[in-house]
Image (cartoon, rainbow, N blue to C red):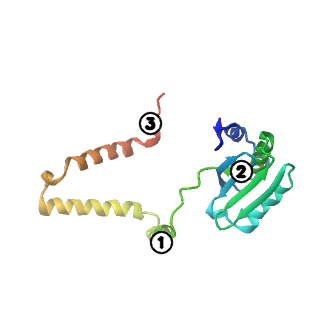
Amino acid sequence: MLTNSHGNPTNIAKLLQQATFKTTLKPLPTQIISNTPQRLRLRISPRHRHLREMQRIVNILKAQPNIREVRINVNSGSVVVNHDGRQATLENILSTLLEIGVSFTDITATKSEAAKKVKGAVVNFNKKFEQATSGEVDLRFLFPLGLSLLAVRQILVKGWQLELIPWYVLAWYSFDSFIKLNGANDWTLD
């Protein structure tokens, strides 16, 4: 059971778990920013911050009884719903949002524009490279191979030099390789 910012218990989590989708709309990732008496504030994910899409939400919510006002800010993706403050009204709002395709998730993990551009460039280069090699090799194979070849070269030129590696680096690589080789999803107690 969740509590709102005034410490009052709400049944939002229970309602979200019982959600049934009556439509097959494309999911609209949204985060509940705040839930206070008579006010619900949502944030739409950056990819879905379009006036037309957000206005559709406003129109559907305004048609409901007990909703006083719905405001949007397309730039920030904010949707503010002022209502009568009753728990039934809040549950009705959330149910309606779920039925029109809103999915409540954490959308805060957004990347910067520079990171998106660099990732896009690398992905495009990788696709072209994979097409050029008929799908035999891609950058996910070549990059580690290149680092391995550099490591072998360093061993041949300078020797093992194990005395230069700090203990904490070896400890970190030991832990990191154990986690990666055993899979993060395998950590369940049966």
Mark 2 lies on residue? 40
Q: Earlier in the sequence, mark 3 or mark 1?
A: 1
The percent coordinates of residue 148 (x first, y second) are 27, 59
Q: Residue at x 74, y 48 (%)?
A: 98
Q: Nearer the viewer, mark 2 or mark 1?
A: 2
In the displayed orientation, state which residue is furthest to the front: 6
Spot the residue most to the top: 190
Q: Amino acid at mark 2?
A: Leu
Which residue is label 3 attached to? Answer: 187
Query: Which numbered disc covers residue 46?
Result: none
Q: Which residue is mark 1?
A: 121
- Residue at disc 1, secondary structure: helix
Indicate whether 93 appears above or below 113. above
> Does dot 2 land on a helix, a strand or a loop?
strand
Q: CA distance from mark 2 to mark 1?
A: 39 Å
- Type of residue at label 3? Trp
Q: Residue at x 44, y 36 (%)?
A: 187
User: Separation of disc 3 and disc 1 at Cα?
Assistant: 34 Å
> Looking at numbered disc 1 in the image, what kind of residue is underneath it?
Ala
Query: What residue is at 72 percent from the left and 39 percent from the top?
Result: 15
Whole-percent x, y for residue 153 in the image? 19, 63
- Looking at the image, tell me whether mark 2 or mark 1 is earlier in sequence order: 2
Q: Is residue 57 visible?
A: no
Separation of marks 2 and 3 at Cα, in angstroms:
37 Å
Q: Residues within 10 Å of mark 1 (few under 14, many from 20)?
A: few
Q: Position of residue 110 (x, y in %)?
A: 54, 60
User: Which quadrant: the N terminus?
Assistant: top right
Left or right: 111 as drawn, with respect to 151: right
**Do the numbered discs 2 and 3 sit on residues whose CB atoms are within 8 Å?**
no
- Classify 10 Å Cα crowding around label 3: few (below 14), some (14-19), many (20 and above): few
Q: Residues within 10 Å of mark 2 (few under 14, many from 20)?
A: many
